[in-house]
Every structure is written in C-alpha cells, then in structure tokens.
Image (cartoon, rainbow, N blue to C red):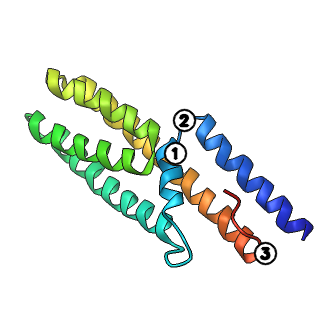
C-alpha cells in the first residue's frame, strides 16, 4: 500500500508541474473528466491522435517552408489546424507558438515562420515526452493496484 501512495503522490506532483510550467491548461482536465469506466483509455486515445496529427502537420509545414516560394495561405491553414488540435488537448505552449506562427504567415515573413517552426518542433516534442511520462506514471499507479487521483 505504501508503494501505491508514493506513486500516486509522484503522479499528482508531476501532473501539477505540467500545469505550473504551462505545458497543459484546463482543457486537459476537461478531457480527463470525459474518461470513465466505459472508456478508460479515452485520454490516451485522444492524445495519440493529437501526436499523429501534429507529426503529419509538422512534416507538411517543414516541406512547405523549404520550397522555393512559400504558400503562406497553405502554411497558415496547417498552423491553424495544429493550433486547434493542441488547444483541444490543452497543450498550451504549442498553441501559443501557433498564434505567433500565424502572425508571421499573415506578414508573409519566411524568417519568422522558420523560427516558429523550430520552436513548434521543440515545444511539441517536449509536451509529447511530458504526456508520455504522465501516462507511464498513471500505468504504474494502476499496475500497483491504486486508482488515479484526480
């Protein structure tokens, strides 16, 4: 039992740090509230879709930005999509970079777009690692016979 309580405490501290450091916002809490016994993998499934989608969009953005002349309307459409999916899971820092990115698309500023793309890739891989760690911690709590503290 001791081990379970320690794991739960670890999980709560880790999750709290994700909010404090701005990786996640309240939208993630709302996502977790939609999960129940009938759909125990809901959050993991939604976040996995976000990972797939983001990876695809980042690849598209990379391709689009490395062409001779950038199609800023297309870039903006991809960034808009990424902004939507990151805000739907509460990936706040990714969402903030998307807002700046769209601004550079409006200005047709290739330099600014390239900078934002680098930032996006970095924030995306950070939040991906953080969420994967969070899910691992949750698995450990469950495996030890505990329940996930809300």
For the point 72% across and 55% down, the residue is 11
79 with respect to 31 (left or right) = left
Q: In the picture provided, is 36 more to the left or to the right than 78?
A: right
User: Relative to 46, is 67 above or below?
Assistant: above
Specify which label sits upstream in the sequence, 1 or 3: 1
Q: Nearer the viewer, residue 138 or 97?
A: 138
Determine if residue 123 is in view. yes
Determine crowd level at label 1: few under 14, some 14-19, many 20+ residues with C-alpha closer than 10 A: some
**Measured from the top left, where is residue 66 in percent x and y?**
18, 40
| Residue identified by numbered label 3 | 144
Look at the numbered disc 1 and give the secondary structure of its residue.
Answer: helix
Whole-number angstrom distance, CA of label 1 to CA of label 2: 11 Å
* Residue 54 x, y percent position in the rendering: 33, 53
The answer to the question of whether label 3 and label 2 lie on touching residues, with beta carbons closer than 8 A, is no
Circle number at residue 126 = 1
Tell me the residue that label 2 is attached to: 22
How many numbered badges does the structure rendering display? Answer: 3
Residue 69 image point, x, y percent? 7, 34
In the image, what residue occupies the spot 30% across and 46% down? 84
Q: Quadrant of residue 101?
A: top left
């Amino acid at each position: 039992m001791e081990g379970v309580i320690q794991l739960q405490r670890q999980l709560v501290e880790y999750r709290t740090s994700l909010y404090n450091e701005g990786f996640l916002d309240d939208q993630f809490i709302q996502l977790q509230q939609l999960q129940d016994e009938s759909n125990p993998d809901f959050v993991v499934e939604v976040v996995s879709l976000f990972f797939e989608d983001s990876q695809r969009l980042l690849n598209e953005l990379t391709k689009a930005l490395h062409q001779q002349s950038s199609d800023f309307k297309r870039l903006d459409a991809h960034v808009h999509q990424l902004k939507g999916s990151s805000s739907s899971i509460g990936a706040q820092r990714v969402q903030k970079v998307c807002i700046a990115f769209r601004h550079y698309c409006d200005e047709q500023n290739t330099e600014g777009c390239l900078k934002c793309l680098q930032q996006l890739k970095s924030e995306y891989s950070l939040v991906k690692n953080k969420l994967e760690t969070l899910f691992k911690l949750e698995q450990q709590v469950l495996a030890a016979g505990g329940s996930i503290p809300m």
